[in-house]
Image: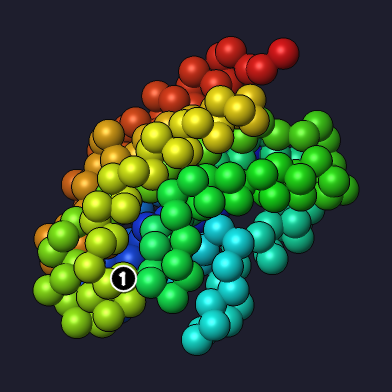
């Protein structure tokens, strides 16, 4: 059985657009992915609302994905593949960062991956640039305050930066925005049909990785 860790934020957790709810397991892209890949794979869902790449939130704290990444690798090992899909929350104006800074922050994840004691071999890595923020986020006063005026434009530049880093680092890359889109309900999160589209694209990419692993 291949063990696949999906490490992400609220779109991996399954936040329902425009509410505080959570999509059921069978609706979330991770749950759909498990069904598509079947019993030969074990999908491990590690989504956390508000999670960033490497930034601890000055208002909320505890949100840097890097902090938990090492213990998570150790706890969930052995692993065959790690999927990293983070970055949406980095675009909050409180962090003042850029797409290229966000992309190259994943170098620290690779450092952790190479140094964390784990059962089995070191897993391959699939870096996924997240879905784009839709301009409708501005209709939500909370999100407008968090993300400011330019988040939709900034998110459109992520895939290029992530692809560049992935090629430099020698890891796999996928652009989630090529397959799924944010809901107009809040401009950030995905409706059920978008989870379905993302799961189908992920399944195809994972099959290619498992069939042709890196040498």
Up the image or down, 52 lies above or below 128; here it is: below
| Residue drawn at x 66%, y 17% as measured from the top left | 214
> Residue 6 at what x, y percent from top left?
53, 48
The secondary element bearing badge 1 is classed as: helix
- Give whichever of 185, 54 is nearer the camera: 54
What residue do we see at 76% from left, 45% from top? 111
The residue where tag 1 is placed is 147
Q: Is residue 21 above or below residue 204?
A: below
Q: How was the colour assigned to the protein in this rendering?
A: rainbow
Total number of numbered discs in the rendering: 1
Q: Within the image, what quadrant is residue 63 found in?
A: bottom right
The vertical placement of 60 against 173, above or below, is: below
- Let me know if residue 207 appears in the view: yes
Q: Is residue 63 left or right of residue 68?
A: left
Question: Which x, y percent locates residue 201?
Answer: 34, 31
Residue 112, position in %: x, y?
76, 49
Q: Residue furthest bottom?
A: 59
Q: Quadrant of the C terminus?
A: top right
The answer to whether residue 22 of the structure is visible from this angle is: no
Give the residue drawn at x 58%, y 45%: 104
The answer to whether 164 appears left or right of 18 in the picture is right
The quadrant of the picture occupied by the N terminus is top right
User: Label 1 crowding class (10 Å Cα cut-off): few <14, some 14-19, many 20+?
Assistant: many
- Kindly identify the residue that appears in the image at 76 percent across and 60 percent down: 71
Residue 73, image x and y in percent? 73, 51
Is residue 48 shown left or right of residue 142? right
């Amino acid at each position: 059985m291949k063990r696949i860790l999906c490490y992400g934020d609220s779109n991996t957790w399954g936040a329902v657009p425009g509410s505080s709810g959570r999509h059921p397991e069978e609706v979330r892209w991770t749950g759909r992915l498990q069904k598509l890949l079947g019993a030969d794979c074990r999908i491990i869902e590690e989504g956390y609302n508000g999670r960033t790449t490497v930034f601890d939130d000055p208002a909320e704290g505890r949100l840097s994905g890097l902090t938990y990444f090492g213990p998570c690798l150790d706890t969930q090992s052995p692993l065959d593949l790690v999927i990293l899909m983070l970055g949406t929350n980095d675009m909050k104006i409180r962090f003042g960062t850029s797409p290229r800074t966000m992309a190259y922050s994943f170098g620290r994840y690779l450092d952790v991956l190479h140094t964390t004691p784990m059962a089995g071999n070191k897993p391959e890595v699939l870096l996924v640039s997240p879905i784009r923020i839709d301009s409708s986020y501005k209709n939500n006063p909370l999100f407008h305050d968090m993300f400011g005026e330019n988040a939709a434009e900034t998110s459109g530049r992520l895939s290029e930066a992530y692809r560049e880093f992935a090629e430099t680092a020698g890891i796999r890359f996928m652009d989630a925005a090529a397959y799924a889109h944010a809901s107009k309900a809040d401009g950030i999160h995905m409706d059920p049909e978008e989870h379905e589209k993302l799961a189908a694209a992920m399944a195809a990419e994972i099959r290619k990785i498992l069939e042709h692993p890196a040498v």
